Image: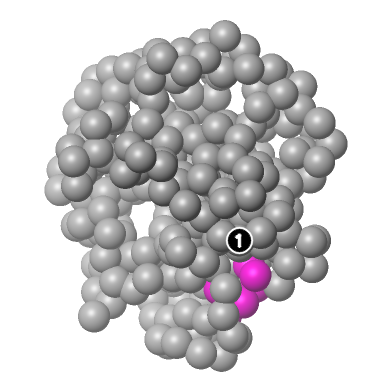
Amino acid sequence: MITLKSPAEIERMRKSSAIVVEALDLALSLIRPGIHTEEIDRSVAELIHSRGGRPAFKGYGGYPANICISVDDEVVHGIPGARRLQEGEIVSVDIGVEFEGYYGDAARTWGVGEIDPDKTRLLRITRESLELGIAQAREGNRLGDISHAIQKHVESAGYSVVRDLVGHGIGRALHESPQIPNFGAAGQGARLKAGMVFAIEPMVNMKGYQVKTLEDQWTVVTADGSPSAHFEHDVVITKSEPEILTNESGDYGKRSRDKN
């Protein structure tokens, strides 16, 4: 069942989402060639705790880190550690925060230093697909309208959407109903109503959509080794325009490293 959030609940989610946005901005400021991913994880966790929040991923299903950092062919759930980021890689940072019983969850992908034009385009198309999906998150539309808008844009660019992983509802739990695939037919699925809150998150591979999970039982990578990008926002269905709870200043936080 899809739960509708009250205005008071949505206000509390705004607070958790604001911490997520601040944490993502901090992660971006730290990304550079040579930094260990565990340094980013540690700094982000310190910020979240300083704001009275809790890193939502830590211990979730046994996950060992505070945030997810996925590099190049890693789609999602990359575990921060001793790995050093390298010039020309792309890195996805996914952060969840619990604050006063409510959750926020968002992800962005950036380049490390200068990245090649193919990766730059992959980031742009993935980001655009999220925007197009959000544009369909309106009362009266169907869930499949979001999924279809994402898939259509991604595949028209020659890329593929990951099919084994989906977006989700969010609120008092990190993952709530419904599941939100990034592919599907328009006009299908649940009718959207004001008060629904979704984490919409296209995961887009440069080549095939197939993925596999590494021996750590967490890190999901592309089966063909191609790069993958991931963007995610928490979105409220309203009586008018969708509200992006995790909206950030600076156009998705991009800087000179992400010249799209």
Amino acid type, label 1: Tyr
Q: Residue at x 73, y 31 (%)?
A: 258
Q: Tell me residue 86's x, y (percent).
A: 63, 17
Number of other residues with Cα within 10 Å of mark 1, as a class: few under 14, some 14 to 19, many 20 or more: some
| Residue 186 in sight in this render | yes
State the residue in front, 221 or 99: 221
Q: Residue at x 44, y 70 (%)?
A: 180
Q: Tell me residue 169's x, y (percent).
A: 33, 65
Q: Tell me residue 219's x, y (percent).
A: 41, 41
> Residue pushed farthest top?
34
> Disc 1 marks which residue?
209
Secondary element at tag 1: loop
Query: What's the magenta region?
Result: 145-151
Display coloring: one colour
Q: Residue at x 57, y 51 (%)?
A: 223
Residue 22, compared with residue 142, is above or below; it is above
Q: How many marks?
A: 1
The part of the image, by quadrant, that contains residue 29 is top right
Determine the main secondary structure of the stretch shown in magenta. Answer: helix
Q: Tell me residue 141's x, y (percent).
A: 52, 84
Q: Quadrant of the C terminus?
A: top right
Q: Residue at x 80, y 61 (%)?
A: 157
Q: Quadrant of the N terminus?
A: bottom left
State the residue in front, 53 or 155: 155
149 in the magenta segment? yes
